[in-house]
Amino acid sequence: MGDWTDLVGKVIDHANILDANVENPQTTHNHVYPRAAQGGVSDLRGWNAEQEHLWDAFNSDPPQIPLVGGTLATPNRLTYGVSWRYGGQWQGHGRYVRDAFAWVRVHGIGAAQRFSIDAHWNDPEYEGDEQDPIAVITCDFTVKWEQFWMTDQQWNLHFIMKGDGSGRMTYGGG
Amino acid sequence: MSESQNQGQQGQSLENYSGDGSDLTEEQRQYLHTYAKHEVSGGGDQQTEVGAKSLSQNAEGEWA
């Protein structure tokens, strides 16, 4: 493993970004850069100003027939995903990742509805040439939805974020 | 009492319920879970993929 592929910068493994309907922002961000860059991400040059984003939106609605009254009229509306910056180079090599974080925005949650989202960060990886690697970091979400105090659904999302700005979100089992 | 009559009565008594569920019987919770739960609605925004950018695009960005 060379100087450009001995990667560090992941500082958080797990974030419970939505804890029983309460947003809990991931304030500590993950990076992927060479260990040899002792000044951290500040030693790298050429970061792209624009963040990349991958997200999913979840919408659900109370039943049409108002069986239990007006307090259930609020629909569930959530948006969640990941953001990161990319493109930093160290000594003119590689393309690395900085400021990767998981997020959720609650737009509305109905009565007796409860959501939780766990974000698990995996160890940094790279792909491509060892002299000119593209950094990769991945994150797995577990979204849990309870209705009337019983788990209704649980589903997983897998996010791939790369130093060249590309990325992908895939849905797992639930 | 028929099942539908029973369900109707359950719905009546829970019509304005907005508590945290701690005062409900298991049967009442089950009733709400069965008849009053949300349905997932269509579509919604999402972004599932972004493409790679060239280094020249990077150079237009800020420098750390």
Image: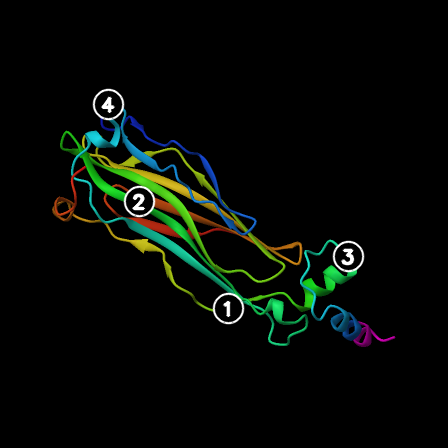
Same-chain status of marks 4 and 2? yes
Which element is circle 2 on? strand
Type of amino acid under label 2: Trp
Residue A174 appears anywhere in the view: no
Instruction: Inspect the magenta stretch and tell me whether residue B5 lies in it.
Output: yes
What span is colored magenta in the figure?
B1-6
Q: Point out which mark residue A130 bears.
A: none
Horizontal side, residue A11 vs residue A162: left or right? right
Predominant SS along the magenta part: helix
Q: Chain of mark 2?
A: A
* Viewport quadrant of the N terminus of chain A: top left
Residue A100 appears anywhere in the view: yes
Residue denoted by label 4: A36
- Residue at x-position 27% and y-position 38%: A97
Instruction: Inspect the magenta stretch and tell me whether residue A149 lies in it.
Output: no
Residue denoted by label 2: A84
Horizontal side, residue A143 vs residue B44: left or right? right
Type of amino acid under label 3: Glu
Mark 4 is surrounded, within 10 Å at the Cα level, by few (under 14), some (14 to 19) or many (20 or more) other residues, namely some
Q: Chain of mark 3?
A: B
Q: Tell me: residue A106, above or below residue B13.
A: above
Spatial CA span between label 4 and label 2 = 22 Å
Spatial CA span between label 1 and label 3 = 28 Å
